[in-house]
Image: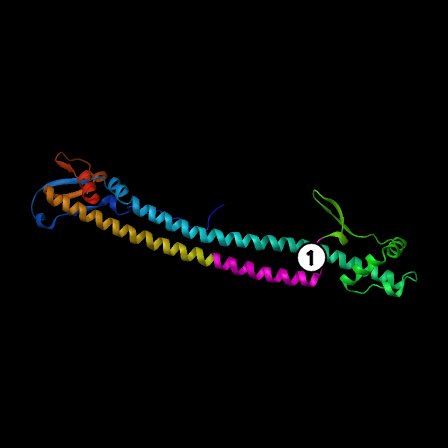
Amino acid sequence: MRRLILFFVFLIPFSLFSIEISLEENKAESGTVGYVDIVKIFNRFAVDYKKGFDKAVGEKQKIVDDRKVELNFFKAQKEKLNFEYQIAKMYEDYNKALAAVLAQSSDVSTSTAVSNSTDTVLESVKSSSETVSVSTEQKNIEAPYIIMPGVGKITLSNYKFSFSSSTVEIEKEISNLDKKISDIEKNLSELKSKFDDELSKKAAKDNEYVLKKIYNAIEEVAKSEGVSVVVDKKNILFGRKTVDLTDKVIKKLEE
């Protein structure tokens, strides 16, 4: 699954491949040219900052993942309620038809008359099962049922609703879930934008700090070695009197 957070390439020395330090005091003099493997220096010195950046990414990703879990939970609830709404609608239609039959039947006593309410119909049907059965059979009204995977045929009167058997109440709860889902999706979008911006700024700030440290170390080593110009190793096309300052700069940084 694709993550919402954009992972930034942290501490990649974009500007280092053409780095050059010209010592001010030797500006008008000829001198020795030195070079450094800037990628090697950068990777050695930036490892701790890379770990810190990865930790920050992980912390923000966990916040996003937790919100996604919450979002998926509400979506699953909504999907279930949509299914139960269809069942409740079938059941209510069946009870209305059954109520109409019972109202016209002279065999049903007044004490077992069925109202338009779903709950009242259920209690009436249970308390006068034999009479209702006969009436239903006579009028060819078949009790509705569903097929549950792994369970089999279940009549709607035996189905256990998770929230309510009323279509009105189910619709209201689905509407509430829609609002929760919309709010979380909006929040996730805002978090992604916010975290991407924060990580980008952190990467830029750490890069700037590391580059400054490296630059200062190169300058100090160059001065101590009497080198007037320092270039990146990749930029050397030819040079017989160039001096490799890489290890000395690394040592300087480690101090």
Q: Where's residue 126, x and y in %? A: 82, 57
Which segment is the magenta one? 160-188
Residue situated in front as seen by the camera: 87 or 10: 87
Residue 179 is inside the magenta segment: yes
Q: Is residue 24 left or right of residue 213?
A: left
Amino acid found under the numbered disc labelled 1: Tyr
Which image quarter holds the C terminus? Answer: top left
Count numbered badges in the picture. 1
Residue at x-position 65% and y-position 56%? 81
Which element is circle 1 on? helix
Indicate how the structure is coloured in the image: rainbow
Q: Which residue is mark 1?
A: 85
Residue 106 vs 27, above or below: the answer is below
Q: Is residue 170 left or right of residue 136?
A: left
Residue 64 is inside the magenta segment: no
Quadrant of residue 115 within the rendered picture: bottom right
The residue lying furthest to the top in this view is 240
Residue at x-position 75% and y-position 56%? 90
Q: Where's residue 111, x and y in %? A: 86, 65
Task: Please indicate, yes or no, whether residue 206 appears anywhere in the rendered image.
Answer: yes
| Main secondary structure along the magenta-highlighted residues | helix
Residue at x-position 33% and y-position 49%? 52
Mark 1 nearby-residue class (10 Å; few <14, some 14–19, many ≥20): many
Residue at x-position 30% and y-position 44%? 47
